[in-house]
Image: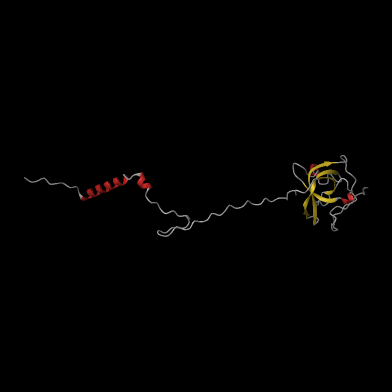
């Protein structure tokens, strides 16, 4: 009687069974083992490729935040400036130059008046002619103005002159609603050079 032979699986099936056993062992690895596994070396500057074995590049310093941009605008009111009441005489030159008219202190003569331009503040105080629609709508009217002289002058390209600036916060008409007598003054600053902008008006008593 012949002895029974031991039947073995073909070699290919044995190799497949070994692969399955190894995979099952790998899947049985715990999360703690995965967390303890060393990770890749961090690179401070991601733009520089890291070659295995080379030291990590030096940390790139972070620049400080940029300072805020300066706010541009007109100079603020100096602390030493005191606002005053002025009397103003409106005169619009025919060529629509930058001058508004003359202003003086209430107790002064018109001979000491200054030729100025006004710095207006919309919603607070604006030149009265704006409500009339035309620059000469309040020609020779007089007003009580409250404000102060600016610590700077502005350039008028129409006359090539530097004008004094009166910064106003209120304007009130005086002498009723009718124009006053024209001043016997030549419009423009005292240092005005002769040019075509001139006025012709009646003489006024002081």
106 and 180: which one is in front?
106
Left or right of 40, for residue 181: right
Residue 53 pos. (x, y %): 40, 59
64 and 137: which one is in front?
64
Residue visible at 36% across and 47% down? 34
One can see residue 93 in this view: no
Instruction: State which quarter of the image contains the N terminus.
Output: top left
One can see residue 171 in this view: yes
Residue visible at 77% across and 52% down? 151
Picture mark count: 0
Identify the image quadrant of residue 86. top right
Residue 95 pos. (x, y %): 82, 52
Residue 124 pos. (x, y %): 76, 42
Residue 131 pos. (x, y %): 79, 42
62 and 188: which one is in front?
62
- Answer above or below: position of 194 versus 146: below
142 and 103: which one is in front?
103
Residue at the far top: name it. Answer: 176
Left or right of 47, for residue 161: right
Residue at the far front: name it. Answer: 80
């Amino acid at each position: 009687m012949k002895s029974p032979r031991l039947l073995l699986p073909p070699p290919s099936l044995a190799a497949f069974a070994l692969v399955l056993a190894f995979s099952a062992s790998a899947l049985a690895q715990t999360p703690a083992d995965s967390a303890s596994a060393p990770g890749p070396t961090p690179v401070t500057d991601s733009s520089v490729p890291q070659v295995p074995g080379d030291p990590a590049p030096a940390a790139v310093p972070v620049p400080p935040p940029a300072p805020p941009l300066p706010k541009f605008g007109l100079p603020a009111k100096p602390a030493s400036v005191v606002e005053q009441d002025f009397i103003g005489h409106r005169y619009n030159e025919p060529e629509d130059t930058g001058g508004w008219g003359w202003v003086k202190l209430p107790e002064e003569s018109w001979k000491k008046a200054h030729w100025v331009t006004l710095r207006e503040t919309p919603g607070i105080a604006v030149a009265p002619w704006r409500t009339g629609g035309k620059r000469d709508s309040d020609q020779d009217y007089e007003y009580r103005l409250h404000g102060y002289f600016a610590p700077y002058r502005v350039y008028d390209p129409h006359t090539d002159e530097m004008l004094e600036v009166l910064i106003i916060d209120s304007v009130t008409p005086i002498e009723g609603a009718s124009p006053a007598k024209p001043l016997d003054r030549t419009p423009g600053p005292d240092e005005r050079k002769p040019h075509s902008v001139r006025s012709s008006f009646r003489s006024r008593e002081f």
